[in-house]
Image: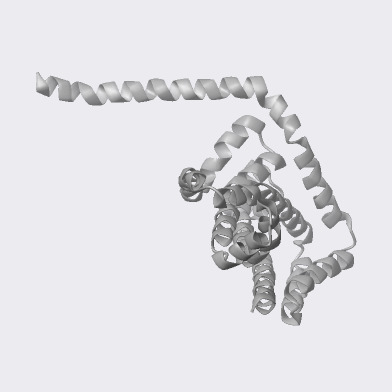
């Protein structure tokens, strides 16, 4: 009798799991048919923002674009080495015929970073004020960071189809955890003595957050933003599978058609852009740290 039960148990488990999967898949398809158009309309401003930034970078004269990116690198780093490296990287990309794809990639990373900051910063701030919320959110962030990146493409494609916006949403979901984690961490690491001093001066909770905690946490938050940018770039090739334009599509084409040179050059362009973003954002974070040490030291 026990042996029969043991033999039947795997079959019962398989049938139950199959029924559950069919139920979830059916419910998801039903939700997509009922609310797919509403979701597309909801994300339409995001699509327009992406198209605007893409047109700005691809249709503006290339010397003007190079000057603008070099200016941003200078303002962030105050380092002529980083500015020179940025200009040399962009010149090499232009000479090798990858300018337009690179500009599309930069516009995608820019929009993804803006969205990640706009969503992640408030979540991190709220987390820092509630230990209970932190206990609930941290496991979710763990899952988001360990989930294979390909998995993020499945729900967004089912909901929104193929195109820029689904790819952008997948990239944001994949890249947003560092902003949330580092914002929460940076605010929690602010010296308690400074918070007590702010309270002694009669600061409200919002004033303490805006004038003390956030400024002191900025270097840590910048480290999170740096990681978000790097993760966004790492997702570019994968997101090209669902229609995201940029350097990822030539890499994907090179993989499917065994074009070694095309894949190598476009991969090096992604690496070059990643190094530029990484050095500029890290330099800005270090400058913030030094400024705060001088101000409070």
The coloring applied to the image is one colour
Q: Viewer-proximal residue, 12 or 126?
A: 126
Asked whether residue 191 appears in the rendered view, the answer is: no
Q: Position of residue 285 (x, y in %)?
A: 66, 70
Screen quadrant of the N terminus: top left
Q: Viewer-proximal residue, 78 or 88?
A: 78
Q: How many marks?
A: 0
- Identified at 62% across, 63% down, the residue is 217
Q: Viewer-proximal residue, 27 or 288?
A: 288
Left or right: 255, with 81 as reference point: left
Left or right: 228, with 210 as reference point: left
Q: Position of residue 45 (x, y in %)?
A: 79, 39
- Identified at 60% across, 55% down, the residue is 179
- Identified at 77% across, 36% down, the residue is 44
Name above or below for residue 238 compared with residue 42.
below
Name above or below for residue 218 compared with residue 289.
above
Q: Viewer-proximal residue, 71 or 254?
A: 71
Q: Position of residue 78 (x, y in %)?
A: 76, 77
- Identified at 71% across, 61% down, the residue is 211
Left or right: 4, with 193 as reference point: left
Q: Position of residue 162 (x, y in %)?
A: 67, 36
Name above or below for residue 77 compared with residue 198.
below
Asked whether residue 186 appears in the rendered view, the answer is: yes
Screen quadrant of the C terminus: bottom right
Q: Residue furthest left?
A: 1
């Amino acid at each position: 009798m026990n042996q029969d039960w043991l033999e039947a148990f795997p079959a019962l488990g398989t049938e139950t799991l199959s029924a559950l999967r069919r139920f979830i898949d059916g419910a998801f398809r039903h939700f997509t048919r009922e609310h797919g158009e509403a979701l597309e309309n909801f994300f339409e401003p995001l699509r327009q923002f992406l198209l605007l930034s893409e047109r700005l970078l691809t249709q503006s004269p290339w010397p003007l674009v190079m000057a603008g990116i070099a200016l941003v690198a200078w303002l962030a780093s105050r380092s002529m080495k980083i500015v020179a490296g940025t200009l040399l990287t962009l010149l090499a990309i232009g000479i090798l015929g990858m300018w337009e794809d690179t500009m599309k990639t930069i516009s995608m990373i820019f929009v993804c970073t803006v969205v990640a900051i706009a969503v992640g910063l408030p979540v991190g701030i709220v987390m820092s004020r509630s230990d209970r919320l932190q206990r609930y959110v941290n496991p979710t962030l763990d899952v988001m960071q360990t989930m294979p990146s390909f998995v993020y493409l499945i729900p967004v494609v089912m909901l929104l189809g193929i195109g820029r916006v689904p790819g952008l949403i997948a990239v944001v979901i994949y890249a947003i955890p560092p902003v949330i984690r580092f914002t929460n961490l940076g605010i929690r690491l602010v010296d308690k003595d400074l918070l007590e001093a702010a309270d002694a001066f009669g600061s409200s909770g919002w004033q303490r957050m805006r004038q003390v905690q956030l400024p002191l946490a900025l270097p840590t938050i910048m480290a999170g933003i740096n990681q978000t940018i790097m993760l966004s770039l790492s997702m570019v090739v994968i997101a090209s599978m669902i229609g995201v334009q940029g350097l990822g599509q030539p890499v994907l084409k090179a993989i499917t058609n065994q074009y070694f040179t095309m894949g190598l050059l476009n991969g090096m362009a992604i690496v070059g852009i990643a190094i530029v973003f990484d050095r500029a954002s890290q330099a800005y974070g270090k400058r913030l740290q030094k400024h705060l040490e001088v101000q409070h030291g």
